[in-house]
Image: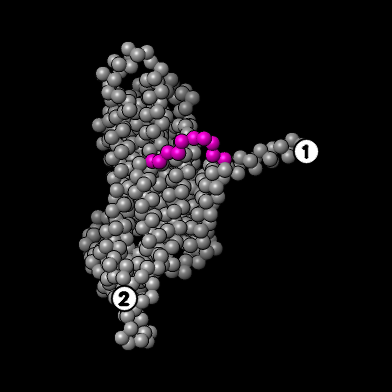
Amino acid sequence: MILLKMTLKKILKDLLHPKPILYFVFIVSPWLFGAVEHWAKQFLFFCILLAFVMWTFQKKEENIRFFPGFIAGIVFLFYLFFQIIPLPPQVISFFSPKRLELAKTISSLTNFPQGIEFSSPLCLSLNPKESYFYLLEFSALALYAFLLYQLLSSKKEISTLILTMIVNGLALTLFGVIQRATFNGKLYWIRELTQGGDPFGPYVLRTHMGGLLLMIVPIGLGFLLSQYSFSFSKEEFFSFRANSDKDFFKKYLFLFFLLVISTGVLMSKSRGVIGSFLFSLFLMAIIITFNETKSKRLSFFLFAFIFSAVLFTLWLPSDLFLEATERIIKTPVNEEARGKIWEESLKLWKLFPLTGVGLGGFEDAFGLVRTVFPGPHRVAHAESDYMELLVEGGIVGVIPVMIFISTVIIANSFKLKTIDEKNKKLAIGALSSFFAGLFQGVANFNMSLMANMLYLVTTIVILSKVVELAQQKAVDSLQKKPMAEKILSRYFHGSVQ
């Protein structure tokens, strides 16, 4: 009995630690319908806030570290807060004259006294309630990224997180395949699709599910290439020595997992998702080709992986893959309503160029310029992360986001040459996953899907942490060398700093 109590006490103590809570958030978020609904965002925010409180009380005297771009992200959060606080009409008129004009028009329609100037405080956002939930979501993302960056302190912990990502992606894909085979028109076989959709797994739209899965594959491949070697010579591949390797089963099992997840990506039927997936893997092959000093065969490995993923998809859900391929080939982009939505979104942005209509205000404001989809059909988003950010955030909102993205890419890319080959492969995989998420946002909307944003942020944290730990390892090893060897190392290879 005493042993049982001690065991339960230890388990409870381990669970009441910020890291398991962050892992819980990371795992469960896609299963909550992508964490797109308000209740899911509030629940995940509470979990992350709880982890932050625990970390604060358990924190030792350690230096707090920030990954590249973090300050720009905080500036963006302050701007979101600025969008939802009531401001005097004079301030609103300075930042967004059209916003004040709309308020006056609405007031005149509700019997506002004639000849009296509008004096009520206003929010820059046309829909402060929706903007609040975006502020909640992005605050949770910033807090999650900050905590994860502090808590990942070793290569082993990073590997555990990546393996968790792979296993969760595998479970989501298999669940999607099973649900498709037994689909009764409801999510989880119990929840009605009240506003339609094209579901896959827990997601209402398979495009969004594909957008999450495509970020798992490049970082998973980077992990495999950094942990295990893959030989392509006939002698070594078929030799007893290669097949008796203790890691043989493990590495090919994870490779199979990634092929299954790739099937989920190709099942999305989305040109944006499939194109982003192929783009990220080709980009990864190119970067490895230019950075790998020992072998050029790794790029061939990635091309072989793409080919295998297509064959695997043709075997499992061939009808969906062929349907997506036919759509890619036969349907011109300019014939779709998406192009028209982008055109009219630009017209809407010109009405609110500086501060936008407020995050979450697109649907309310789009009626000012809308001509597409006449009738009751909803146009809730601009069908592009970047277009919607421009419309809802204006120039002031776009600038910190672009600085954030640029800082993450540039700061880590320049450091790749200073780290060892194994960590470089993992970092390139994480960088390719980040690019996959960014590229997919060109023609699809993900900002309201907190789960997808969590996975995108996780790739940033892993990328920055791998580079930091690898550089610190290089510094530590250099400090242990004799002085003469240090001078020669700096002379021939440059400073590791």
The alpha-carbon separation of the residues under discs 2 and 1 comes to 70 Å
Tell me the chief SS of the magenta region: loop
Pick the front one: 81 or 447:
81
Q: Residue at label 2? A: 102
Q: Residue at label 1? A: 1
| Residue 257 visible, this angle | no
Residue ID at (29%, 65%): 95
The spot of residue 189 in percent (x, y) is 53, 61
Q: What stretch is highlighted in magenta?
A: 58-67
Q: State yes or no: residue 59 in magenta.
A: yes
Q: In which quarter of the image is residue 234?
A: top left
The spot of residue 75 in percent (x, y) is 36, 52
Residue ID at (38%, 50%): 74
Quarter in which the C terminus is drawn? top left
The spot of residue 113 in percent (x, y) is 36, 86
First in sequence: mark 2 vs mark 1: 1
Q: How crowded is mark 1: few (under 14 residues within 10 Å), some or many (20 or more)?
A: few
75 up-or-down from 479: above or below: below
Q: Quadrant of residue 224?
A: top left
